[in-house]
Amino acid sequence: MNPGKLPLMASGARKLVEVCADVQPGEQALVITDMRQDPLLAEALAAALVARGAIPLVLTLAQGKLDSGEPPSPAAAAMRAADVVFMPVSVSFTHTEAVREACAGGTRIVALTQWTADMMIGGGIDADFAAIEPRVRRVAAVWDAGETVRLTTEAGTDLTLDIRGRLGTPHAKTGIVRRGEFHPVPDIESPVSPVTSEGVIVCDASIPYLGIGVLESPVTLEVHGGRVVSIAGGRAADVVRRAWEAMDDPHVYNVAELGLGMNPHCRLIGVMLEDEGVASTCHIGTGTSTTLGGTVKAACHYDFVIHEPTIHVDGRLLVERGNLQLPAD
């Protein structure tokens, strides 16, 4: 913690409160943090909420055990009761029943997993979220209408995904959080959850979980029948493999998501919500898919970030080496 950073964080905190969540005077606002996170994050958010005229409650938890493991039941109840929730936590609660149930009741949730004080000062937070939102929704509409996606990279990824009947629009992450939505900020992305998938994933950018971060060498995952059947690639692969095995849950191997990063200000720094938003990347999520339109609830949700993807949807080019190809864009 560096208290001298608090004044520098004020602008980012205001943007999260006033732009991303559009907090209104008198709203009940919950800030959930944990004992491993910099307390300045919660302090900056609480100050911005008070300045906005909201009624903030700060709840500090012990660190969660698993990314997308469920929060304690009192925290889940507080989430359901709040108008808006900010979550600067060290371990993700994003893909959980607690989030799904709170959103179903109308709560707006801003996920701030692994945030640092510096992220509130600059980086992805500098994006013009409202200006980017229409592009994200245009990509989501492509997923809505699509049936087959092919993802390739020069590093060796070659993955085919069946997305028939799966929608992108309800799950588009624009950073503008409306009633009943959760958004991971500053990760602007357009995700879709496949029915099934087949092929090879060569993750060459980042695995921002389990203390891995930016990769020094690639990790290769083989996918058959919508499940990861093998993972190889040195220490990083070993860490993921051991974590999956320890969970003793067959659903953790589910290929849950293809997400396209769309924030031009995000940087690859080993923190999930910066890395997954980098505009020249995509990521493949594994494990839980229920919060993205899928049907699988797993013990975790991990993302594998990939450099410069080429993506075709029903044979039409959508992304070429990390560059979005939208007509009349």
Image: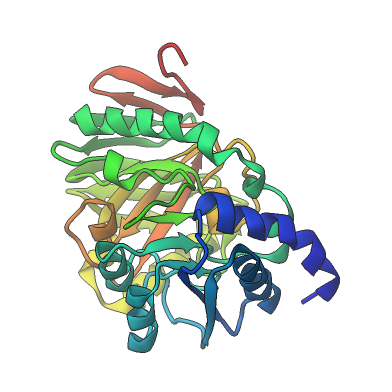
Residue reaching furthest to the top: 328
Write the residue at 36% across / 30% down. 139
Write the residue at 65% across / 60% down. 13
Q: Quadrant of the N terminus?
A: bottom right
Horizontal and vertical percent position of residue 4 = 86, 70
Quarter holding residue 300: bottom left
Horizontal and vertical percent position of residue 102 = 31, 69
Quarter holding residue 5: bottom right
Q: Is residue 230 left or right of residue 184?
A: left
Horizontal and vertical percent position of residue 171 = 32, 47
Write the residue at 49% across / 55% down. 21
Q: Nearer the viewer, residue 310 or 296?
A: 296
Horizontal and vertical percent position of residue 16 = 58, 56
Q: Nearer the viewer, residue 274 or 320?
A: 274
Quarter holding residue 250: bottom left
Position of 124 relative to 42 (above/below): above
Question: Is residue 176 shown to the viewer in this render?
Answer: yes
The coloring applied to the image is rainbow
Residue reaching furthest to the right: 4
User: How many numbered tags mark residues here?
Assistant: 0
